[in-house]
Image: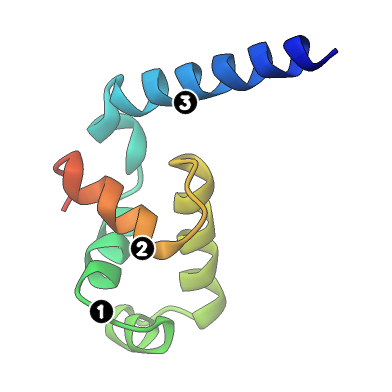
Amino acid sequence: MNNFFCCISVFDETYRRAFIHHDFRQTACTKKRQKEILQLISEGLTNNQIEERLFISPLTVDSHRKNLLIKLNVNNTVSLIKLAVQNGLI
């Protein structure tokens, strides 16, 4: 049974890498607002600062941040920014 899960794990990682590198810029930030928020996060702004700058609610900022984490399959904001820089999104 361990071999089965090992194969799934290897497949998942291979698929994730292929997804990340396939049309990454086009897939990653399909929404203009997500790209704006990603840029502001990379500049070190907090959710509250982003909310004030873009005139949106803090929950909206948080939703965009979470959606980016899910879309790019990363676990935290540092990984999100690192991946975005490596792939020329910001």
Q: Amino acid at mark 2?
A: Val
Q: Position of residue 68 (x, y in %)?
A: 44, 51
Q: Are marks 2 and 3 in contact (CB under 8 Å)?
A: no
Q: Which residue is mark 3?
A: 16
Which residue is most to the right? Answer: 1
Say which residue appears at 34% left-offset and 39% top-offset. Answer: 28
Q: Which residue is mark 2?
A: 78
Mark 2: secondary structure? helix
The quarter of the image holding the N terminus is top right
The quadrant where residue 3 appears: top right
Q: Residues within 10 Å of mark 1 (few under 14, many from 20)?
A: few
Q: State which mark lies toward you, 2 or 1.
A: 2
**If you read the primary sequence from the N terminus, does the residue marked by circle 3 or circle 1 appear first?**
3
Q: Which residue is mark 1?
A: 44
Q: State which mark lies toward you, 3 or 1.
A: 3
Say which residue appears at 36% left-offset and 82% top-offset. Answer: 55
Q: Position of residue 54 (x, y in %)?
A: 31, 78
Q: Amino acid at mark 3?
A: Arg
User: Could one spot residue 31 in this view of the protein?
Assistant: yes
**If you read the primary sequence from the N terminus, does the residue marked by circle 2 or circle 1 appear first?**
1
Q: Is 36 left, or right, of 28 in this rendering?
A: left
Mark 3: secondary structure? helix
